[in-house]
Image (tube, helix red, strand yellow):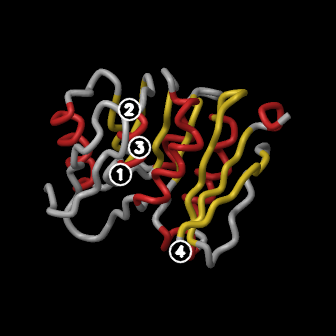
Amino acid sequence: MMKEHAPRILGGFLKGRALSVPRGRATRPLRVLARRSLFDILGPLLDEARVLDLFAGAGSVGLEAVSRGAGEVLLVENGREAIRALRQSIDAFGIGERARVVGMAAHEFVDQAAAGAFDFIFVGPPYPLLRDGDEHLRAALAGLPRLVAAAGWLVLETPVELPCPPLAGLDRVDERTFGDTRLSFFTPPSAAD
């Protein structure tokens, strides 16, 4: 499942290691420039953080977070090929004590997760789900604000041609554009003060 041009970890103790990627085009790893900028902004906040990578795909964000010091990372994904690739990367990197794959649909995970459980949440849903207004995606997005810790961050990746959906209960505090990709940064209201 390793491809010649597989995404690589950009920083931290795993820097330069290539990720296993699933076959086909079902996943779309976050582009290098966007990922580098994301971790330049949030990097100092990751030390021992509890991280959720929702719609993990190849895990380019979640596994980067492990490499940069996150204490625990949950990679939520329901595609069989993607789950297999995530587990291969975790095994190859020897980080099974800090990274765990949760094989289930995003909206189901969000329904079951504990409130305030995550210091950093990255949400990179498949663009077709955003374009189609998928009901399961809407349910997952509606439930996410309660999972963010009081001083936590949520970053939502969307295509620039679509408006960023609001996340009730969170303040959008920043937005960055990288080609056709937008990253929107949210915090609980108390964290933005």
Say what amino acid the circle numbered 1 marks.
Asn
- Of tags 4 and 1, the one toward the viewer is 4
Near mark 2 (Cα within 10 A), the count class, few <14, some 14-19 or many ≥20, is: many
Point 14% across, 63% down: residue? 4
If you read the primary sequence from the N terminus, does the residue marked by circle 1 or circle 2 appear first?
A: 2
Q: Is residue 168 left or right of residue 127?
A: right
- Of tags 4 and 3, the one toward the viewer is 4
Asked if the residue under mark 3 is in contact with the one under mark 2, i.e. CB atoms within 8 Å, the reply is no
Asked if the residue under mark 1 is in contact with the one under mark 4, i.e. CB atoms within 8 Å, the reply is no
* Number of disc labels: 4
Q: CA distance from mark 4 to mark 1?
A: 25 Å
Name the disc covering residue 180, or none: 4
Say what amino acid the circle numbered 4 marks.
Asp
Q: Quadrant of residue 152?
A: top right
Say what amino acid the circle numbered 2 marks.
Val
The residue that label 3 is drawn on is 76
